[in-house]
Amino acid sequence: MKKKLVLKPFVVPTLYTIFAVLVIVSLFFSIDIEKDKDNLTYVSKVILDSYVPVVNTEEKIVRPYTSDKVVIDNNYYDYKGKDEDQTKSIILYENTYIQNTGINYKSDESFDVVSILSGEVIEVKEKELLGTTVTIKHSNDIISMYQSLSDIKVKVGDKVETNEVIAKSGKCDLIKVSENNLHFELYVNGNIVNPNEFFDKKLGEI
């Protein structure tokens, strides 16, 4: 025959006391949290919004236009190039021959000028001979300069993406062949370079 479990007289009151204490403590903490709710700081997506972009080494340098009707009028003057190519890279202005420090593009119609890489606009300026100029700073110490522009779409401080339209082609007093010109220059590590050697290259290759 099984023995019947008999609780001692003090056990039941003790259990009731413990339960009552737990209820009071839980109520105390809930009231305390409710009072301080407005002072709590919650994790939100705002923290992620202030991230520092990582350089995409796979990003490619594109040409500063998208129209297939754009052609080269004067190429970059390469000191190490062939005599024939150098002759085509010289600009005649007021009886003075000037070695071209960039590439002059032209078209029979107005065309969009686009950023060759993502970056930040650091200058928008009007120049006497080359017209309105937009300068963009990119990663890996690369700076691109777009001259002879019209209908400017950006301002200093703007962040732009690769292939984003920044302006339209325009007029250049230095080169009076067409109304639809673009004079483009590229700088890498502070040195002016031949853009043709960098188009289609990945940032990680520079």
Image (spheres, rainbow, N blue to C red):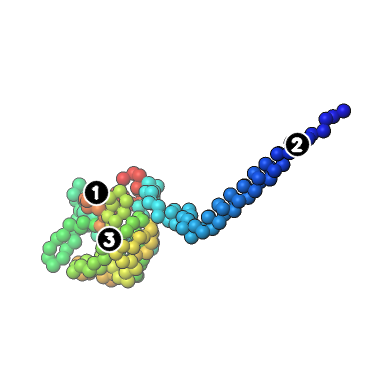
Front one among 187 and 101 = 187
Q: Residue at x 29, y 64 (%)?
A: 156
Q: Residue at x 68, y 45 (%)?
A: 16
Mark 1, Cα crowd under 10 Å, few <14 / some 14-19 / many 20+, is few
Q: Which element carries disc 2, helix, strand or loop?
A: loop
Residue 110 visible in the picture: yes
Give the CA separation, mark 1 to mark 2.
88 Å
Query: Can you identify the residue that label 2 sits on?
Result: 7
Q: Is residue 4 left or right of residue 63?
A: right
Q: Is residue 38 left or right of residue 143?
A: right
Query: Can you identify the residue that label 3 sits on?
Result: 122
Q: Within the image, what quadrant is residue 89 found in?
A: bottom left
Extreme residue toward the front, this view: 9
Give the CA separation, mark 3 to mark 2.
85 Å
Amino acid found under the numbered disc labelled 1: Asn
Query: Can you identify the residue that label 1 sits on?
Result: 189
**Nearer mark to the viewer, of 1 and 2:** 2
Amino acid found under the numbered disc labelled 3: Ile
Q: Within the image, what quadrant is residue 114 found in?
A: bottom left
Extreme residue toward the top, this view: 1
Count of numbered tags:
3
Q: Within the image, what quadrant is residue 148 found in?
A: bottom left
Where does the image place residue 174, in percent across and percent down from the top left?
Answer: 20, 67
Give the CA separation, mark 1 to mark 3.
16 Å
Where does the image place residue 155, in percent across and percent down from the top left?
Answer: 31, 66
Where does the image place residue 199, in percent across and percent down from the top left?
Answer: 33, 52
Q: Which element carries disc 3, helix, strand or loop?
A: strand
Where does the image place residue 206, in percent across and percent down from the top left?
Answer: 31, 45
**Nearer mark to the viewer, of 1 and 3:** 3
Extreme residue toward the left, this view: 95
* Mark identifier at residue 45: none
Q: Residue at x 40, y 52 (%)?
A: 51
